[in-house]
Image: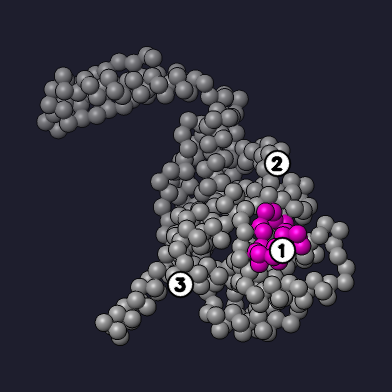
Amino acid sequence: MDYNVTYRKKDKGIQFIISYKDSKGKWKQKSRQGFKTQKEAKPIITQIIKQLEKDLELRSNLNSDLEGITFKEYYMAFIEHQKLYKEFNTIQHYKATFNAFSKLNEYAVIKIKSSDIQKCVDKFVENGYSENSIKGFLSSIHYAFNYAIKKEKIILNNPVQDIDFKISKSKNNKTALTKKETNDLLDKIKNKKLHLISMIAAKCGLRISEILGLTWSDIDTKNSMLIVNKQWKMDKNGQYNFGEVKGKNSIRKVPMPKDLMKEFKIYKSEQKILNLNDRIFDYNSRESISATLCNTYKKNGYKISVHELRHTYATTLIGNGLDFKTTASLLGHDVKQTMDTYAHVTQDMLDKAKKIINENL
């Protein structure tokens, strides 16, 4: 690397200036000041020069053909490639992510900085995006930039670093029904399919995709257990079909209460047409049935989603003293995820303990 070092007095001390040629042959400078002597400055100079040489070597390996590629051009090519390897829903999330960051479309990828990402995130917060949505966007965009580093060799550093955002907790509290409210809601749902789906969510805590993926062979009547080993999801071609569960923790067996077992028996005895693939529920679109359930709950006085019945299930377990590890296994979570989501319940338990202590000790 071509470079030279000069010194000069500045602010009652010594300043050094390193002049060097970058990867394009242009002269640039780096400087530091505040040293008492040139000898004191030399270790810092050596450190900077080594880093510059390292960066220069790395930059020489960058793909010059893609040097001017814009963010929009890059993500379109990125998505086309990822379609070969990722699930349909993942691709849809990538598309949503890049649309969210569309303000960067005309930026050259190599010029995007952390501050540019931060400005986009600031807008997400201003527009009321949820914490999970923002985290999801940042995770996807971070992966895309890592791909630009490791595979495409367009950039050296990932700009998705040290991004700040804070969401008001009051906006993100999920609704957990009481036992009385849960029973009231279930009693009001007259459609037998919607009633049974809601019971499974509230009394076994399954995700809607797992419920729609249930087959009759998954109902262990002998041991009163639900077997969760697949889900109903879109495949790579955008068609709904059986698919793998969300993660290894999602493969599980969940105890069924007696009233749910009874409902399964009644439902099966009244089911006139059996599905060829043995599915219990013949709904195709997960989004459509989720919307139908949401509207049904709203008409019956409860502004919740079917996922909040799963939340009710978890809250009920922990609120009644079940440990986080067991609760996590029943939900198909890892323990950390369960503790992060439901730690507030422990405060409810603490308040209950205080009441018992005050009344009995």
x, y percentage for residue 202?
Answer: 61, 72
Residue under the image location 48 percent in, 23 percent down:
59
Q: Dot 3, crowdedness within 10 Å: few (<14), some or many (≥20)? A: some
Q: In the rendered structure, which segment of residues is drawn in magenta?
A: 211-232
Q: Dot 2, crowdedness within 10 Å: few (<14), some or many (≥20)? A: some
Q: Is residue 226 magenta?
A: yes
- Measured Cα–Cα span from mark 2 to mark 1: 35 Å
SS of the residue under disc 2: loop
Q: Amino acid at mark 2?
A: Lys
- Measured Cα–Cα span from mark 3 to mark 1: 27 Å
Frontmost residue, 208 versus 154: 208
x, y percentage for residue 72?
Answer: 62, 42
Q: Which mark is residue 219?
A: 1
The image quadrant of residue 261 is: bottom right
Going from N to C along the chain, the mark reached first, 2 or 1, is: 2
Location of the C terminus by quadrant is bottom left
